[in-house]
Amino acid sequence: MKRKISFLKLILLAAGILCVFVSCSTSPKAHAHIDAGVSSGAYEAALASLNDEKVQKTLYPPKNNILFYLDRGMIKHYAGMFKESTQDLHEAERLIEDAFTKSVSQEIGSYLANDNAKDYAGEDYEDLYINVFNSLNFYHNNDLEGALVEIRRLNEKLNFLSDKYQKAKEKVLDSNKQLDPDQLQIEATKFSNSALARYLGILFYRGTGRPDSARIDYDYLLQAYELAPEIYTNKIPSSLEEEFSIPPEKGRLNVIAFTGLSPIKIEENVWIPLPLPPPNNRSRLSLPVMLLRPQTIQSAEVVLDTGERFPLELIENMSAVAMETFKSRFGLTVLKTTARTIIKSTTSAVVAKAADSNNSGVGSLLGLVGRIYTDVSEQADIRISRYFPGNALVGGINLDPGTHNVTVNFYGNGALVNSQSMRVFIRERGLNLAEFVCLK
């Protein structure tokens, strides 16, 4: 009897330790100082907080290397550290490619525990927008050819995106015959063309004297709106009509502004029935769900020293792209999480039955512990980068060549929230692109 009680205590202690261990997660407050710096435009302070040794150990352990380079690379871009930003974003892109081609060893680990056991592999929208911001980094460093390479790289990724998850689904179903493929569908993304990338392509091609290529990207931009009306609910920016009709002896000023912040993830729990004896006849699926962050900025206007002014118009809701491209990955996550839960619960039920058949009297207890392990060990992977923008706005005007003072006013709820100014030299030929950022 004493032996049974000791065994019971040991099992319950192990279950308790397991509960504490697997439920530990990073507090949202850990990002507070970095978030505050980014939101207020104090990017150097945000970088100092991100580079703090304690913060790196908490937020960016080795499994989160991609997040580290994404977050730091984006903040460096906002801070005007364009070469350093390129280095970080290129490293993030390289790690994302490595994660995709890595062996199945981490996949096996994720089946035993949860997706947090793996290195963070990056979201699709993160991988795509790396190239957008690297193209701007190259532009700011006077390398338009390098900028165009980044835009073409993004378009190649979009071509690959359409069948990426269907192939992954086939692999999961092949190794888990218990799953019903008709009940676990993976929704194909409707995002196959980026208006933002095409807009930058228009500018970069025009800036390098290739109007025919610029017009091809213009046609693709129009197509992006036609193919994904769920994402592009806004009208095509009116300033695009003037990009190919710049009067002689005039220069073209293009303005791009990024506002708000990209979505984050939260954990959502769903209970499912299982064809197993109690207590393993139901289990919890812990799933990551994307959540939009509040957007303070609702509109923006450019004011020039000439007295002229014009609105900046939305060209791409980047948060909507993040939500849309996440759908396919979410479907695969549901598939894998269900398979993993079935494996754990079935194993627990088999162990409990075997214990009962040996008249040990601990079968039901083992079944309960197995159920606890299955539920507690399931944690949604809510890792995601935090500092991509939520929206991209654009506008343009033809001006006399020379130096002009350009101000962008950002508004929310009818009131001025932020105002930024810069001096821009307008050339008669070439590209004159000014970038503004307000991530409130």
Image (cartoon, helix red, strand yellow):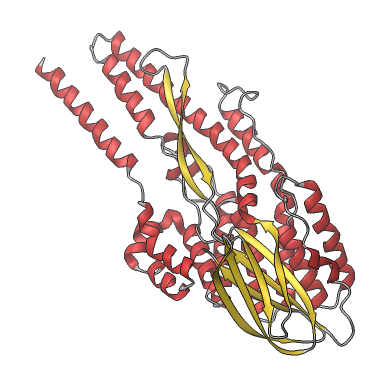
- Name the side, left or right, on which 113 lies relative to 120: left
Is 253 or 22 nearer to us in this picture?
253
Residue under the image location 49 percent in, 47 percent down: 265
Q: Is residue 138 above or below residue 375?
A: below
Is 420 or 357 nearer to us in this picture?
420
Outermost bottom residue: 402
Q: Is residue 359 above or below residue 208?
A: above
Q: Point out residue 206 in the picture as x, y percentages from the top left corner.
A: 82, 74
Q: Point out residue 104 in the picture as x, y percentages from the top left corner.
A: 53, 42
Residue 326, located in which quarter of the rendered image?
top right
Q: Point out residue 266 in the picture as x, y percentages from the top left corner.
A: 46, 44
Q: Point out residue 356 in the picture as x, y percentages from the top left corner.
A: 29, 10
Outermost front residue: 414
- Name the side, left or right, on which 357 lies relative to 109: left
Residue under the image location 45 percent in, 75 percent down: 44
Residue under the image location 47 percent in, 14 percent down: 275
Q: Is residue 76 above or below residue 290?
A: below
Is 209 or 102 nearer to us in this picture?
209
Residue 178, located in which quarter of the rendered image?
top right
Residue under the image location 42 percent in, 44 percent down: 117
- Name the side, left or right, on which 83 lies relative to 152: left
